[in-house]
Amino acid sequence: MERFKRDTSKEHGLAIFKNSELLKIYHETLSKKSGQSDSFPLLEILLRKRPVRSLSGVVNVSVLTKPWPCPGKCIFCPSQKNIPKSYLASEPAVQRAVTNKFSPYRQVAMRLKALREIGHPVDKVELRVIGGTWSFYPEKYQERFIAECFRACNEFGLKSGVKGLKSRSGKQNLENLQKRNEKAKCRIVGIAVETRPDYINPEEIKWLRGLGVTKVELGVQTIYDDILQLNQRGHTVAATIATTRLLKNAGFKVAYQMMPGLYGSSFKKDMAMFKEIFTNPGFKPDYLKIYPLALVKDTKLHKFYQQGKFKPYTEKELIALLIEIKKTLPKWVRVERVIRDIPPNDIVAGSKTLNLRETVLKEMAKTGLVCQCVRCRETKGDRAADEKPCLFREDYEASAGREIFLSFEDKARTKLFALLRLRLAGQAFIRDLHTYGQMAQLAQGLASRELIQHRGLGKKLMAVAEKIAKKSGYEKIAVISGVGVRPYYRKMGYKLKNTYMVKTLN
């Protein structure tokens, strides 16, 4: 696209416009045509900046909570004034939050606006609430926080953008805002929160479902009690195992945040840790975030480093460890991150490379190694017409239940188009349904011909899951649906019951 603009300008003496300027003109033109949806979606894709932002089928919006006391006393966590514990003022997400005075409404609005301005559809939003131990915050604050996120999405539109960036006074009922979101242009299809393994119980699970949470990121860090104690985490491995089971039995997607390089650990021990996570049925998370320990100031661990009691991994050691981890991962886990967005200037010692994933994959490629995780195989900008999806099934035991991973992939299993996670453990639960590739807008007919989304792959996976559940003796099946996806399941005969979408298997 850039080359075409340069060649055309030279030949005809035309002015060169930035992609963002062309997108603005494009959106303004469409806004004048009342009642019409986007007429040229492929043109918008060509003009899009940072295409990876919506290549997983959704756009991610991270929203930071206000500074709040943390129950943990971890020796590696920084504690900066007026910043949530474990976060640094220099991190991009923190800077956005500070700019917006930690208002959830304004944070969401600003992020949606920025994504839209560089050409990304914002119809399907995965909301990620960050800022420490979510379950430790007062329930009134949690409810208002989530309500404001829903309100920001409900009020976002192409023609008028966001109707003001100020949070309104007066409480709006969360349930009403959720119902509105089912028909909004910008729908929240999933909500993830961060918390500790020792802060989840049946009452908390019920509360999270009322908020609309579909995924829980557990700050596990390590699966060795002695290392947890040395780093003053304040929870046990037993808590991680119990919490994982509780969450899966309630239909949640479970993500582990792991931290190799902790005080008292070693290369050999970290290697063994990741191997056990995916072989021990007590663990087996659906998603994984690898946050190698970053040594920063304002921590107790930094004092240990100055005293010569601790030495972080060098970049070479860390790359070697990540290669060993990634080359043995199962096909059903998605590695979302391998490094945190901590600016290099804040890191005292150790790796300062922010694009560590790309570095690791390049090193693996040199010796013919590949990572089989979901993210490394998910389709990107491929045309649907060029692909012929094949159905695959993989069964495994986890958290005292039977997990069934269904997927549509190419024959060689190098490209993954859609997946479904079905759990059979007392009841049949669809915990995850996702179609990858470039996001198709909700009212975009052309997408069904050109892109992977909106081609019925999700419905086919649902039908297979229902047959498996029925054959296994289950009379009903439930889905932990994001609020914005409820209409999709209703079309397949599901009804809302106690925050879940439920269907009787006739």
Image (spheres, rainbow, N blue to C red):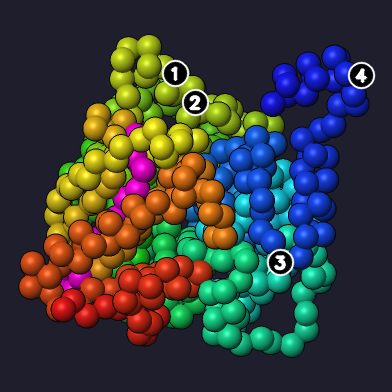
Q: Can residue 302 be seen in this view?
A: no
Task: State the SS at label 3.
Answer: loop
Position of residue 30 measured from the top left corner of the image (x, y, whole percent): 76, 54
Residue under the point 57% across and 74% down: 183
Q: What residue type is labelled 2?
A: Glu
Q: Name the residue under label 3.
A: 35
Q: Which of marks 2 and 3 is nearer the N terminus?
A: 3
Residue pointed to by mark 1: 362
Q: What element carries label 4?
A: loop
Q: In this view, does 194 lie above or below 150?
A: above
In the foreground, 460 or 263: 460
Q: Would you place residue 428 above or below residue 75 in this image?
A: below
Quarter occupied by the N terminus: top right
- Cα separation, mark 2 vs mark 3, equals 43 Å
Q: Decide: is 374 above or below 10.
A: below
Numbered tag placed on residue 358 in the rendering? 2
**Magenta segment boundaries in residue numbering:** 415-428
Distance between mark 4 and mark 3 Cα atoms? 36 Å
Q: Which residue lies furthest to the top in this view?
A: 366
Marks 2/4: CA–CA distance? 39 Å
